[in-house]
Amino acid sequence: MDPINEVQLLAELDNECCGLNHGPNTDSKDFPASDYLVVPVGYVNNDGQDTAVRELVIPVCHECAQSLLQDEWTLIYCLECNSSRWVCRKLAKNAYRHHILWLGGCPDCTNKFGGLYFNDLPSFKQPAELLASHIPVQVC
Ligand SMILES: [Zn+2]
Ligand SMILES: [Zn+2]
């Protein structure tokens, strides 16, 4: 991300609420954002150089940012409808090793069920990053 956009985003951080799911009956207004999760998506090959077409920017609160950096939780995020949920790795039937799994459609989307794990595709060559703290979050 270019530094100007970065500064702009961080300046607006005070007005943002967490974009991730905190469970039923919660209001995102109760979770002010403290950081952004920045995810490069949609790579194209330009003269042998892979360039991200856009960056997905998701405001996250302190609690979520911490969870992304630790190994207890895996975030499952749908790129189609921006819905998300957290899976506790200890309690999960499947062995989750990743911090984030990306879906190209989920049961919450009305028309599509992609169920696609995007971390296997070349669109995620770079790890997601927490902007304010500049900590790369492992994607796959
Ligand atoms: Zn949050
Ligand atoms: Zn969805």
Image (cartoon, helix red, strand yellow):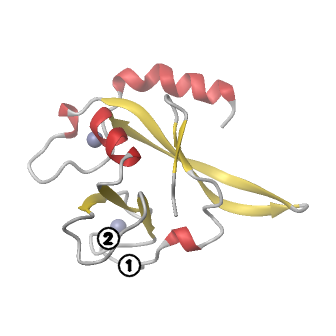
Whether the residue carrying mark 1 lies under 8 Å from ligand 2 is answered with yes
Which quarter of the figure has residue 27? top left
Image position, residue 56 (x, y; %): 52, 49
**Ligand 2 is found in which quarter of the picture?**
bottom left
Indicate the secondary structure of the residue bearing disc 2: loop
Q: Which residue is mark 2?
A: 109
Q: Residue at x 63, y 54 (%)?
A: 126
Residue type, mark 2 in image: Cys
Q: Residue at x 28, y 29 (%)?
A: 32
Q: Which residue is mark 1?
A: 112
Image position, residue 101 (x, y; %): 42, 65
Q: Residues within 10 Å of mark 1 (few under 14, many from 20)?
A: few
In the displayed structure, 31 sits above or below 121; it is above
The one of 92 and 116 positioned closer to us in this rendering: 92
Indicate the secondary structure of the residue bearing disc 1: loop
Instruction: Say which mark, if any, is on residue 88.
Output: none
Whether the residue carrying mark 2 lies under 8 Å from ligand 2 is answered with yes
